[in-house]
Amino acid sequence: PELQFPERLNCASELLDRWVAAGQGDRLCMQAPGLRWSYADLQAEANRIAHVLVEDLGVLPGNRVLLRGANTPMMAACWFAIMKVGAIAVATMPLLRAKELGQVIDKAQVSHALCDARLAEELTLAQAQCPVLRSVAHYMSDAADGIEARAAGKPASFQNVDTAADDCCIIAFTSGTTGQPKGTMHFHRDVMAICACWPPHVLKPVADDIFIGSPPLAFTFGLGGLVLFPMSVGASTVLLEKAAPDALLAAIAEYRATVCFTAPTAYRAMAAQVAQHDFSSLRKCVSAGEALPAATRKLWKEASGIEMIDGIGATEMLHIFISHTETEARPGATGKPVPGYQACVMNDEGQVLPPGQVGKLAVRGPTGCRYLADERQRGYVMKGWNLTGDAYLIDADGYFVYQARTDDMIISGGYNIAGPEVEAALLAHPAVAECGVIGLPDEERGQIVKAFVVLRPGHAEDAAMVKTLQDFVKATVAPYKYPRAIEFRASLPRTETGKLQRFKLKQSA
Ligand code: 3UK
């Protein structure tokens, strides 16, 4: 990929204004229920908001601007306005409460906030505790001082701030399951770099594609997949405020979407409901956020005819760095380094391990981890390699095979057991809807393997089922890996980004 960027670069000019300047302003850019924006519409909206930021709110280049809202075209317009004025977008997950918002505001020294009026309450509470946050403006609001009312009086043109390619433009917070949230800094050139690597080499989108999906725009998986990547090729996107599996399926049919981004569990849930919906428009399905079990890949293929594209990304890396095209899929493997990135598997001493050995995943490329004022930078980046915290092995053909988060490896009776491998085995049983596997402290064995299982409707949660599932696992993976304990649950704890919260399962056990 071409990764040389000019010294002065503003990603809003490259992804948005460029299409209007090239006479393509009428192309469809964004849809939402009751709304269709062309590239020119989005540009005019972003420009008006940029004027509001500078003239009414006093935002200066380099200021940190918090963004809070469900996925909507207005949220995207606000994001581009922040880019245009040379400020830094700090997008936050819609479900964050006042305390967590306060941590983000303090950590990133947020001076201004743009907030969906329907999510105002928790931010108002946070603001009372955070003097550094000078102003909060609301969008999706009819108020006289709301962003829409202010924007209506502003010109539709705006001269973007002449930012440097390595001016910071995003502080993305990790979904961090434990401890203080970590802010990761990314530059204008990083935004363009992710658009130059994975999409043209793996996804291969075209200008007529209609993107859709569930990840929040505050999650860089969603920002890339639902805004940056479609716009980098002049395609369009559908932004849904609510994108639970049934709503997402219905929307794919309604908008005739062609490219879908969501998490493995959502594909599993959608596969069970395909009969009710028409998704003949779909041509590419991307899975990320957690490992894609082979059984889920198979279910979705049987239901939709589509071979999924898996990819591992991280907030620290901004987007996906190991993946595969749909024709090179290997069930159970994540794929190979995305062109532009290098990856290897290392031992604890930082030595590269040969194929077949499990170790720490290390990756480097045009994007990488820059924690904002955080000691943990030292643990993530070693000699230029980013250590993502994942245990992987490389197979004989160079495919990277996910094992577990390094701190989730289970050690039982002297054996190393990767929970996700046991999960993958359980998921292949037709009675299993969802499952999560953890190590439970045990006096004799150190840890034992415990599985939490959600059954599909119509199956009994009894001792016979426990035995059936245990025998099933023993027949597919090494018998010592079978779950000695199985507990049935109605649902499993997940983050807004679709990740299983194993630490919650551990606490509850
Ligand atoms: C795990 C995966 C196996 C892995 C993300 C795509 O998930 C994203 O970022 P986060 O910072 O989490 C990173 C961690 O999540 N993971 C993600 N994808 C996969 N494990 N297979 C996968 N396909 O532990 C990784 O270290 O929340 C994903 C794009 C942008 C992202 N930020």
Image: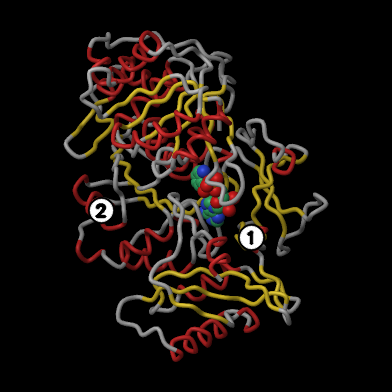
Residue 227, percent across and down?
Answer: 38, 34
Q: Is residue 334 left or right of residue 263?
A: right
Coloration mode:
secondary structure
Which amino acid is tagged 2?
Ala
Residue 225, percent across and down?
Answer: 41, 41
* Residue found farthest to the front: 128
Above or below for 178 versus 357: above
Q: Is residue 323 visible?
A: no
Q: Is residue 309 left or right of residue 437?
A: left
Q: Is residue 504 visible?
A: yes
Residue at (57%, 19%) from the top-left corner?
A: 167
3D distance between C-alphas at marks 2 and 1: 39 Å
Residue 399, percent across and down?
Answer: 61, 57
- Secondary-structure class at tag 2: helix
Q: State which tag comes first along the sequence, 2 or 1.
A: 2
* Residue found farthest to the bottom: 464
Q: Which residue is mark 2?
A: 247
Contact (Cβ within 8 Å) of mark 2 with mark 1? no
- Secondary-structure class at tag 1: loop
